[in-house]
Image (tube, rainbow, N blue to C red):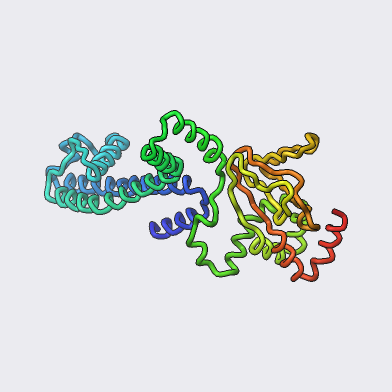
Amino acid sequence: RFVKLRRVLCECLELINSESIRAVFNISLAVAFIIMVNHYMACGWYVVGTVGLSHGWENWLTENRISEEGDHLYSYTTCLHWSLTQFTPASMEVRPYNVVERIFSIFALLFALITFSSFLGSITAAITQLRKLSSESVKQQHLLRVYFTKNNISTTLSKSIWTFLKNNHFAHQTRSHKAQVEVLNLLPPHLQKLLHQELYGPYVTRAPFFQHFAAVSADCFVEVCFRAASERVVVCGEELFLVGKAATKMFFIASGVMQYEHVDARLCTTVATGLWASEPALWLQWVHCAPLIAEASSEIIALGVAEFREVASSFLFALPKMRKYAARF
């Protein structure tokens, strides 16, 4: 049953995507197993005491004034307390009084020595993993501190730079990037395509055209996500595109805030999370009329125009609907 329970719990753990929840789950699981093992050891300790009592030997039940008809809750908690002391450096007044109890205590200590080390290692590893999840900004702060110290940068300027980065960059990072996980490059093409679809599809389909496109031509949409979609980060003040430049990509804001700064104040607008820009580039030769500037560090999903057209042209059954949409656009 224990093996089956462990397998079921491991399968449940695989369904959890949050690393923080996984770490907490691992810690809780290790603590639960320690309690369960101690429960059975406590029951065994009580049975050993009753054996000595039935044979008229000196035993821990009699010496501690615990009778079989007495308070069962006190008896159980005393046994559990004794069991826990075998796993830790703690001590208590209960001790073995005959050979059987002494042998059971020795085996309990040996078992605790092996299992508790394993449980303790699991808990330590889970806590370490939990700390690592929040260590990126701490690591970057340390690197900056070393850099500033070696280059004699003033404390005031150092603090100002870190405050800016913390408020405008780290606070707006909501997702990890595929490029950060190098092992994903080992995936075969069909898994790469499915991964790209789930990575970029939720953002791309915010545009009405792609929402309909994904429904009527799923295979083509998967190919578009695989070959045309990519991701990038722009920092506060960085220009995503410049005025007068030919548009080569359509952009989706995954997180952050961008500002479209047109010379005509009536056309200036804020492009926030969930919105998109440069859709005309998909259907015609488009030149940017104004720059799009990040007001905070922003995560962008970019859809290459040339790649989109190449993929779309290879799925002939989807072309008439796209031409119809382009004409209406």
The x, y position of residue 29, in whole percent, is 40, 48
Between 278 and 78, the one lying in front of the other is 278
What's the residue at 23%, 46% (across, down)? 45
The x, y position of residue 263, in whole percent, is 77, 38
Residue 247 placement, left or right of 16: right
Between 9 and 297, the one lying in front of the other is 297
Residue 155 vs 219, above or below: the answer is above
Residue 25 placement, left or right of 259: left
What's the residue at 21%, 38% (across, down)? 90
- The image quarter in which residue 323 lies: bottom right
What's the residue at 24%, 50% (across, down)? 112
Residue 134 vs 181, above or below: the answer is above
The x, y position of residue 324, in whole percent, is 86, 60
Residue extending farthest top: 156
Between 119 and 201, the one lying in front of the other is 201
The x, y position of residue 220, in whole percent, is 72, 65
Tally the marks: 0
In which quadrant will I find the N terminus?
bottom left
Between 181 and 41, the one lying in front of the other is 181
Residue 216 placement, left or right of 225: right
